Image (spheres, rainbow, N blue to C red):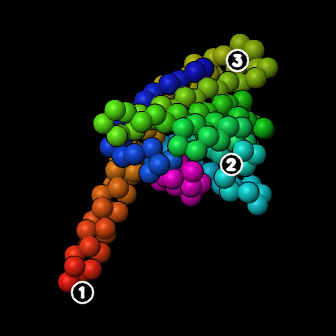
Amino acid sequence: MRLKESVVISAPPKLVWDYLAEPSNYLHFMSGVTRWEVVGEQRTDIGTRYRMLLRIGSADVGGLIEIVEWNPERDMAWSSVTGVDQRGRWRLRETDDGRTRVEFRFAYGVAGAGLPGMIAERVAAPTVSSHVRRSLHQLKRQVEHEKLRAEAARRKREREEARA
């Protein structure tokens, strides 16, 4: 099953990328994700591995994933190593007005499971689709909130420097 959703975030690509590149943020914005933890010493870039689990009904499914594409402020993609067959991609593109269009692509399947696997994919589709949409909207909310906090801190520093 392949899913694709996008949203426009009122922030530059660097700010969005910095948020996406930090593994500890995933549990804050990825809907349905119950585990996203670094496996090994490397935390980011190509070759990084994460243990990722997604809640589908009453089960947590997923497995070990590996970052297979890392193009800062543009693209990040992963593919499964073990567990449920999955591929994910974050695609960031700056709009003409300085905002960022973020596209999230997610494909999953039950490899080699035949008809029961196809049925399981179809049954899970509404839940996974909802998680993808919610994840994008939660990412938008988190990044835009971080942008506002950074701007407020900058204005406060400028006021304090002007008084000094």
User: In the image, what residue occupies the spot 30% across and 58% down?
Assistant: 148
Q: Nearer the viewer, mark 1 or mark 3?
A: 1
- The Cα atoms of the two marked residues, 3 and 2, are separated by 36 Å
Mark 3 / mark 2, whichever is N-terminal: 2
Q: Secondary structure at mark 3?
A: helix
User: In the image, what residue occupies the spot 34% across and 32% down?
Assistant: 96
- The Cα atoms of the two marked residues, 1 and 3, are separated by 70 Å
Q: Amino acid at mark 1?
A: Ala
Q: How many C-alpha atoms fall within 10 Å of the one at disc 1: few (<14), some, or many (≥20)?
A: few
Q: Which residue is mark 1?
A: 164
Q: Which residue is mark 2?
A: 45
User: In the image, what residue occupies the spot 36% across and 46% down?
Assistant: 11
Magenta span includes 19: yes
Against 89, residue 151 (above or below) is below
| Circles 1 and 2 in contact, beta carbons < 8 Å | no
Q: Nearer the viewer, mark 3 or mark 2?
A: 2
The magenta region covers 18-29
